[in-house]
Amino acid sequence: MLWVISQVEVYPQQVFSFAEELYSEGKYREAALEFLRFITLFPNSDSVDYAHFMAGYSYKLANLLDFAEEIFKKHIVENRRGKVWAHYELAKIYLYKGDTFKFYEELSKMPDNSVQKKSLVAWMRLQEGDWEEAKRVVEGTVLERYIYDPGLKSPKKAAFLSIIPGFGRYWLGDRGTALMGAFMVGTFYALGFYYKFKEKRDIPAYASFGVGVAFHAGQIYGSYAFAKVINREKWRELLENYSRAVEKYMNPKYEDFFGNR
């Protein structure tokens, strides 16, 4: 009899562990169903709120967003532990679906000092190109170190510096192109002066000047455009680093469901 009782007592943990095992293996749909089965079998368990959230979270990872949305909404209505996490995941689902109104609605329901809300607001500021404000928003959180000065280059300054052939590209760090450009422009300008003042031949002089000016104009525009390319790449890297940090640190833990609701 004692053996039978002991088996019954450990059974909830077996079901819960199996659900977590499916989740860790990336079998998210199966994990969601197992978490829901745990809730049905053991509605009074201390782990039921976490299991309920994880069912929705697993559906989200399985890209079954409508199922996930339904569970997260129910999580909030039933006032289960970890409501802020449910609001957070709903906000991300609406963002993915492009429903801006519902996204801001969920955002407004999160506590202002919650790291969940801060992480989303910082993401919005990064999308707007304001890394300084994004960093201020998450100041004091683990996400702060992943928002930094991307070191953007001014396209206008790059173009202005290119008035001196090659200097704009050199400032942007593209030294090979800078040296080649300076050589090409300098060569055609030198030929123009040579034909104009040495050989007194206007046609080849003006032709050389024309080619030099064309190369020079191309360098000025090229430096302007290249600065924009560099900035896009640096900004993309910043966004990717921040997104990876959010994926790593903004995942609810079991203990998160035993504090404030």
Image (cartoon, rainbow, N blue to C red):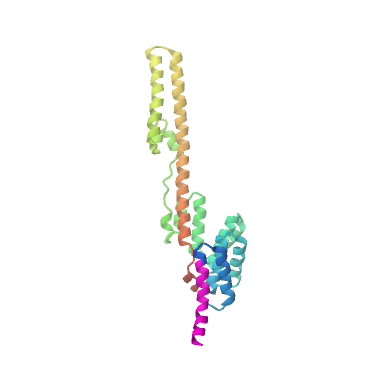
Asked if the magenta segment contains residue 8, the reply would be yes
Q: Is residue 74 above or below residue 124?
A: below
Question: Which residue: 38% across, 16% down?
Answer: 194
Residue closest to the eye, 249 or 1: 1
Residue extending furthest toward the top: 200
Residue closest to the eye, 220 or 256: 256
Q: Quadrant of residue 204?
A: top left
Task: Provide the major secondary structure of the magenta segment.
Answer: helix
Q: Is residue 89 visible?
A: yes
Q: Is residue 81 visible?
A: no
Would you say 36 lies left or right of 153 here? Answer: right
Asked if the magenta segment contains residue 73, the reply would be no
Estimate the x, y position of residue 147 in percent, counting from the top left: 43, 54
Estimate the x, y position of residue 36 in percent, counting from the top left: 58, 71
Q: Quadrant of residue 61?
A: bottom right
Residue closest to the eye, 177 or 197: 177
Q: Which residues are magenta?
A: 1-21
Label count reads 0
Estimate the x, y position of residue 212 in percent, counting from the top left: 44, 24
